[in-house]
Amino acid sequence: MEIPVALEKRNKPLLKTEISFIIVHLLPLAAIFTGATMFDWLMCAFLYFFRMFWITGGYHRYFAHKSYKTSRFFQFVIACCTWSGDAFVKSRPPLNNNK
């Protein structure tokens, strides 16, 4: 016996939004033509991996899942290491996909 599946209604893609999304993600490649030095590339890679470690291992696992216990001071350290300048994004209520 087959279970009927209801198809979800989707909106048409917004071409302007898609193009701007692609441009924003390809724009950093322009750094190749700006004369960025090896130090700049190494610093970029270091900061990327540093932030990704703190965002996944610290911020997400602690604040979303409460995977471990930590002191109030270390909570502050985690928040500072993942700070991106947009406090409103980080202060929104959790999404329902982390159950």
Image (cartoon, rainbow, N blue to C red):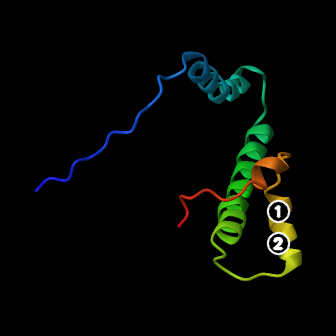
Within 10 angstroms of label 2, few (less than 14), some, or many (20 or more) residues? some
User: Which residue lies under the disc numbered 2?
Assistant: 75
User: Horizontal and vertical percent for residue 58?
Assistant: 71, 67
Q: CA distance from mark 2 to mark 1?
A: 6 Å
Q: Could you tell me which quadrant the N terminus lies in?
A: bottom left
**Secondary structure category for the residue under label 2:** helix
User: Which residue shows up at 83% across the image and 45% down it?
Assistant: 86
- Give 17 or 30, whichever is nearer the viewer: 17
Within 10 angstroms of label 1, few (less than 14), some, or many (20 or more) residues? some
Mark 2 and mark 1 residues within 8 Å of each other at the beta carbon: yes
User: Which residue shows up at 69% across the image and 71% down it?
Assistant: 62
Q: Amino acid at mark 1?
A: Ala
User: Horizontal and vertical percent for residue 53?
Assistant: 68, 61
Determine the image quadrant of residue 14: top right
User: Which residue lies under the disc numbered 1?
Assistant: 79
In the displayed structure, would residue 66 be above or below residue 50? below
On the rendered structure, is 60 left or right of 72? left
